[in-house]
Amino acid sequence: MDETVDKTEEKTTVKRTRKKAVPDKIGGYKPLQKIGEGAMGEIWLCEDPSLARKVVVKQMQASLVGYEDLIQRFQREAVLLAHLNHPNIVHAYSVWQERNGRLSLAMEFIQGKNLREILDVCPQPPVWVTTFILHEILQALVCAHRHQIIHRDLKPSNMMVEKNGRVRLLDFGIARNAGAGQEMTLPGSVLGTAAYMSPEQISAQKVTPQSDLFSLGIIACEMLMGKHPFRGETMEQTSQFILNLNVVPKHFPPEVPAPLAKWVCKMIEKKPTHRFSDAQEAADVLAATCMQDYPRQLDASLAQWLRAIFAQVPYTSNFDESNSKKKWFIFGAGVGAATILFILFEIIRSAVS
C-alpha cells in the first residue's frame, strides 16, 4: 500500500515538474516558450509587459552557477553587445542575476529565419542573395573588429534574415576582446563550431579578425556550392579537411562568377596573412567585383525571396538576367562601334586612293 502511495506521489511530482517547465517569470519578463538551448544557456521568448513587446532572454544553465569563469564569459557577452551599436548586429537590453544565482541577458527579438533554416529549404540560393548576405555580415564584422571584438563562432544558425530582409549577426557568447589583457580562454583550448572553424582555431593558435573571415568564407562556399566544402563523416575528419583540403575556383559550379569564386578562395586561405587584411577590404572587393550591377538596397528583394521559398512558390529575380543582358549589350555596342569604324576607314581609304 505504501509503495502504491509513493508511486502516485512520484507521478504527481513528475507532472508538476513538467507543468513548471516554463517559469512564471524571468526577471521582469513573462516567458512564453523556450526557443533554444545550448551548453551555456537556455533561450526564451518572453513578453515585456512594461513596453508591450517581445524580447529574447538568454538564461545561464543552472548547472553552471558557481563557475566564476563561465559567469564572467556570460557577463562579457552582454558588455560586448552593449558596445556594438550597428543595424546588422542584435541589440542587448539588460543583464541581471536571479536569486538562484543564474545570470540572464535580455536582447531584442528578431522575427525571421536564420541562415541554417534557409539553407535547409534552399541549399544553393541565387548568387545575388548570397553576395548580399555576405556583404551585410561583413558590415557587422567591420563594426565588431573595430571594437577589437572577434566573434569566433560564425555559422549559419548565428545569422538571421528578418522578415523585412535585414541581415543580422547573433550570438557573441564566445566572442573575445582582442585588446591586451582581455583573453579569457586558456592557451591551447578550442572554442567554436568545428565545421566552421579556421585552421588556427582548430590548431589552438592565436585567433585574429582573419579567423572570422575564414569562417564566413566556409559559409560562402556552402551557399554557392550547395554543400559544405569541408564536411567529413566525423568532427575529426572535418577538421583535417579544413586544415589540408584546398578549394580552388574550378570547384565552384559554372553559374558562379569567376571573380566571386576567386574572392571566396581568398577568404579561406589557410594562412591568415594570405586572406584579406580585414573585413572592410573583403567587403569593398566583394562590392566592387561582384555587386556593381545590383541595386544598392536589396532588403525588400531578399524579403520577397525569403517569403517565396518558405511558401514554396516560384520567385524570379531579374538581377542576373538584366546583368547578362547589360553585358551582352555592352559587348554588342562595342562590336557595332568597331564595325562602323572599319567601314569609315574603308570609305576614307577608297576616297584617298
Image: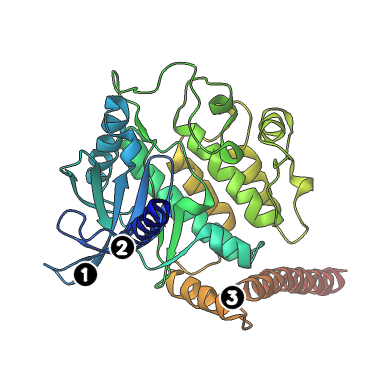
Residue at the outermost left position: 50
Which of 303/317 is in front? Answer: 303
Residue at image mark 1: 53
Residue at image mark 2: 109
- Marks 3 and 2 sit apart, C-alpha to C-alpha, by 23 Å
Residue at the outermost top position: 187
Callout 3: SS:
helix
Q: Position of residue 347 (x, y in %)?
A: 82, 75
Q: Based on the displayed image, in which of its 4 quarters is residue 162 positioned?
A: bottom left
Decide if residue 310 is on the left or right side of residue 339: left
Mark 2 belongs to which amino acid?
Phe
Residue at image mark 3: 309
- Marks 2 and 1 sit apart, C-alpha to C-alpha, by 9 Å
Q: Position of residue 8 (x, y in %)?
A: 39, 59
- Marks 3 and 1 sit apart, C-alpha to C-alpha, by 28 Å
Mark nearer the N terminus (3 vs 1) = 1
Mark 1 belongs to which amino acid?
Arg
Viewer-nearest of discs 3 and 2: 2
What is the quadrant of the C terminus in the image? Answer: bottom right
